[in-house]
Amino acid sequence: MVLTNDRELAAKLHSLSSHGRMAGHPLYEHHLVGSNLRMVEFQGALLLAQLARLDEQIKHCDANARYLAAGMEQIPGVRSMKWDERLTQWGFYYWTFKFIPEAWEGITRDQFLQAAGAENLPIGGGGHIDPMYLNPMYTEGHATHRKHECPNCEYAWKNEALSFGHATFLGPREEMDLILSVFQKVWDNRDELRS
């Protein structure tokens, strides 16, 4: 524990224990190299009790993700990431997939997100908001590491990357079918998105 009456020092210490985040800034904006070492005993006790379910949940999420990826092969305009054949089981926090702008002929990723959102589909814009190297931790002050532009990364971030949180895959297989039906519905009605 650290006690201080110095507000600036308190803010830096809080940032160090919160991934380098700063109060009053976006959640996934990092200003310092920090950790996530902030679990309290009660959280640890809950986690310990839940670990008995982890293997089963990882297998379930992996099976649902593979099922969803296979179904997406039948729908133009969206694709899952390619699985490395050496991967036997995947435990993930975000499951990222790709919006293919060329297939949609003028419809943007954000229009797709809006249409899917109208169907109550919880899609995010690619996980952690923006490329890490664009965070203030890398672009300002003490740790200016950015020496090169990464146009392909930035294009993917703005135009292609989409994601589901891991909890999306904890449900039954029928929920994957609902996701696929929304993708198909948006595709089938894409002309309406253009107007």
Image (tube, helix red, strand yellow):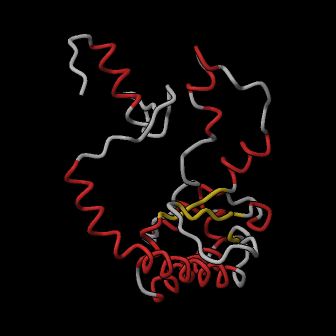
Q: Is residue 46 above or below residue 69?
A: above
- Taking 170 as reference, is 156 above or below it? above
Kindly indicate the quadrant of the structure image that contains residue 187. Answer: bottom right
Is residue 120 toward the left or the right of residue 161 in the image?
A: left
- For the image shown, how many numbered marks are present on the structure? 0
Q: Residue, x 59% and y 58% (percent of image)? A: 111
Closer to the camera, 89 or 24? 89
Q: Position of residue 179 (x, y in %)?
A: 52, 78
Q: Quadrant of the C terminus?
A: bottom right
- Which quadrant of the view contains residue 133? top right
Q: Is 16 on the left or on the right of 147, as rendered?
A: left
Residue at image point 45% right, 65% down: 122
As drawn, is 102 to the left or to the right of 45?
right
Image quadrant of residue 86? bottom right
Question: Whole-percent x and y of residue 18?
Answer: 39, 36
The percent position of residue 121, horizontal first and vertical second, equals 46, 70
